[in-house]
Image (cartoon, rainbow, N blue to C red):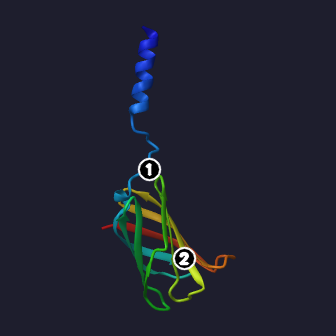
């Protein structure tokens, strides 16, 4: 009897969804707006869209050097963390990498401007977004 009960408990646990299971791209898809600060400050809009079973999107950023839009080159998720990178339109030799932790309809994270060829961070800071 104990073996049957133990087998039933193991089967039930195996069938239950894992708490560490990654959210689907639908969870993150949508319009996110907010601000960034650090080496520069301004507003940031992030549009994430579902592209098959992955995410794609673009950013709209205001800066002292000029406003710009850019397509995200990469987007990856792991649990409640999202990382995205795009080519920096104001300097074609640089890229911006953003990493954020998502908590419901809010995201907080860091941004880093780096040379595409590698090397040290040129500028960086933090950002905060809300899903609208």
Task: Indicate the secondary structure of the residue bearing disc 2.
Answer: strand
Q: In this view, does 98 lie above or below 68?
A: above
Left or right of residue 106: residue 83: right
Q: In this view, does 82 lie above or below 73?
A: above
Q: Tally the marks.
A: 2
> Residue lying furthest bottom in this view?
65
Mark nearer the N terminus (1 vs 2): 1
* Frontmost residue, 56 versus 60: 56
Q: Which of the numbered marks, if any, corresponds to residue 8?
A: none
Task: Indicate the secondary structure of the residue bearing disc 1.
Answer: loop
Res. 80 in view: yes
Instruction: Characterize the local packing of mark 1: few (<14), some (14-19) or many (20 or more) Cα atoms within 10 angstroms.
Output: few
Q: Which of the numbered marks, if any, corresponds to residue 96?
A: 2
The image position of residue 91, as x and y in percent, is 56, 88
> Residue lying furthest left in this view?
132
Left or right of residue 57: residue 120: right
Left or right of residue 110: residue 45: left
Instruction: Characterize the local packing of mark 2: few (<14), some (14-19) or many (20 or more) Cα atoms within 10 angstroms.
Output: many
Res. 44 in view: no
The image position of residue 63, as x and y in percent, is 47, 86
* Frontmost residue, 39 versus 131: 131
> Residue lying furthest right in this view?
119
Disc 1 marks which residue? 22
Q: Distance between the residues labelled 1 and 2?
A: 25 Å
Residue at the spot 45% in from the left edge and 24% down from the top edge:
10
- Residue 92: quarter of image: bottom right
Residue at the spot 40% in from the left edge and 52% down from the top edge:
23
Residue at the spot 46% in from the left edge and 64% down from the top edge:
108
């Amino acid at each position: 009897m104990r073996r049957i009960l133990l087998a039933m408990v193991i089967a039930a646990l195996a069938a239950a969804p894992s708490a560490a299971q990654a959210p689907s791209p639908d969870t993150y898809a949508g319009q996110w707006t907010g601000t960034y600060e650090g080496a520069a400050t301004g507003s940031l809009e992030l549009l994430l869209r579902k592209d098959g079973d992955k995410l794609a999107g673009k950013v709209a950023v205001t800066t002292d050097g000029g406003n710009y839009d850019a397509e995200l080159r990469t987007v990856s998720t792991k649990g409640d963390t999202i990382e995205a990178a795009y080519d920096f339109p104001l300097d074609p030799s640089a890229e911006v990498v953003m990493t954020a932790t998502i908590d419901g309809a809010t995201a907080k994270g860091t941004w880093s401007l780096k040379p595409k060829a590698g090397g040290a961070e040129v500028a960086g800071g933090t950002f905060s977004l809300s899903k609208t």
